[in-house]
Image (spheres, helix red, strand yellow):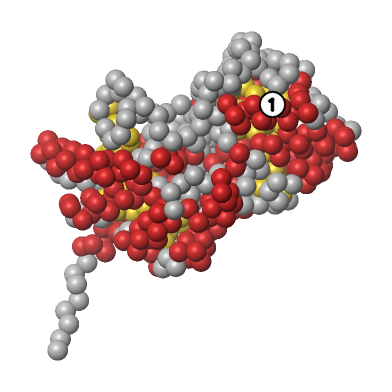
Amino acid sequence: MKIDDPALAAHSPAAVSTLLPAALPTVPPIGTKNAAPAPADGLEAPDALGTRRRIALVSDHASPLAAPGSIDCGGQNVYVAQLARELARAGHRVDVFTRRDAIGQKQVVQWHDGVRVINVPAGPAHYVPKEQMLPYTEAFARFVTRFIKRDARHQGAPYDIVHANFFMSGMVARHLKQTLGIPFVITFHALGQVRRLAQGAADAFPPARVRIEHALMQDADRIIAECGQDRQDMERLYGASPARIAVVPCGFDPDELWPMERPAARSLLGIERAPFTVLQLGRIVPRKGVDTVIEAIALLRAHHGIDARLLVVGGDAGGAGGGAAGGAVGRGAGKPAGARPSGSGRDAPELARLQCLARHLGIAPDVHFVGQQPRDALRHYYGAADVFVTTPWYEPFGITPVEAMACARPVIGAEVGGIKSTVVDGSTGYLVPSRDPQAVAARLATLQRNPGLARAMGEAGLRRAGQHYTWRIVARQAAAVYADVLAEARAPIPMTHP
């Protein structure tokens, strides 16, 4: 865990370490990078049985190689990438199967030590919205089956377990279980019934999705829910057995995200003289509720007399390329902003709608759409912000609030899905109703007027993130689920007597 925020840096390293859970390594001096954490948490034993395994992760539309923030690249991509890396660091061998979406992609990519990414030829070799991918699932499953049979001859052993991510990946995993006898677990990442309740007619997935999800909850050897709300939805809406569900959250990487000095972060982004700064980070799609945050910024000025700058990070690579709805903001290591958003990306309609909203509310110069950013730049944006705000209509888990907490920033989050589990209302930030800009503005005003409270909430979030939400912890919990499933598969069947 790295610390270089002034609120924490004012203390000696020994004092700073008291802000963190005892299980984490001692905090290094400000500005230094800590060595890899000691294996005190036991992850070096790959699972409860100490067995190193071959694991297949299936992630149909969400490649770990995709650029973050594009229209169909979000939390699932991060989840699969980080889980694969942490499992490999623990000694497992991991393959990720994902759909080929570009001509020229290598079929097998050696991504990290112990991690391969297999780009599966199923459907056209270009982007396909995930809502339209169901017809290619059968071809995906057939290819993966052939690949596994062929690969087993070279690798010397088949996969021990398959971890499916999303319902279409679950269909592939079920086919592998039926044809090759490999058990599977599934993380849905989003549920069709919940999505339909939140989006109504705007939900473009085929109606068959809900039926498929229901069947998969009966067929999977274990279901991994990402939070308590996710588990409740499975039990209430799908009749899933509580005994078949394990809760394993998402996480953050402490080698990627840690607190930094706000002035230093703003200097890197070219916004040294910024007013109160609010960050929203994620895909530019309607359900993320970016319009709620924009409306809150306008209300913050109109009702509370507080000027604020909003940074909106995310968007398709061909869309928001930097710049602002009005004015400019620097990007990266002190570089000026790129061109104004071209509106040519797949999220162009939503981006245009949000820009129009900002102009209509008279705050266009203060709303900056900085576009898609590399993972190693996100720490600068979290660090530059006074507050992180996320107000989706629904959210299966929501990784960005955890990332903001890992950077010691208070979070205002919609009281939906996993955000209800990660953000502790009144301690690490505030929970607000979704689609309620007045509530967001009121909480922003409270934090702007009470910097000590904001700092304390950021520090509480940092502690919480480190205690519960590192990817190492997540991988250890997932490996324990795998071990339980495999132990059950090996258990002898009880003899019955007439």
Q: Amino acid at mark 1?
A: Gln
The quadrant holding residue 59 is top left
Q: Position of residue 482 (x, y in %)?
A: 32, 54
Front-most of residues 4 and 363: 363
Q: Position of residue 454 (x, y in %)?
A: 75, 39
Q: Is residue 440 above or below residue 348?
A: below
Determine whether the residue tagged by mark 1 lies in a helix, strand or loop: helix
Give the tally of numbered discs. 1
Q: What residue sits right under mark 1 in the picture?
A: 355
Left or right: 117 as drawn, with respect to 331: left
The quadrant the C terminus occupies is bottom left
Q: Residue at x 76, y 20 (%)?
A: 365
Q: Position of residue 305 (x, y in %)?
A: 89, 33
Left or right: 356 as drawn, with respect to 397: right
Left or right: 459 as drawn, with respect to 496: right
Q: Is residue 441 shown to the viewer in this render?
A: yes
Q: Residue at x 26, y 64 (%)?
A: 488
The quadrant holding residue 217 is bottom left
Q: Is residue 44 shown to the viewer in this render?
A: no
Q: Residue at x 53, y 23 (%)?
A: 345
The quadrant holding residue 269 is top right
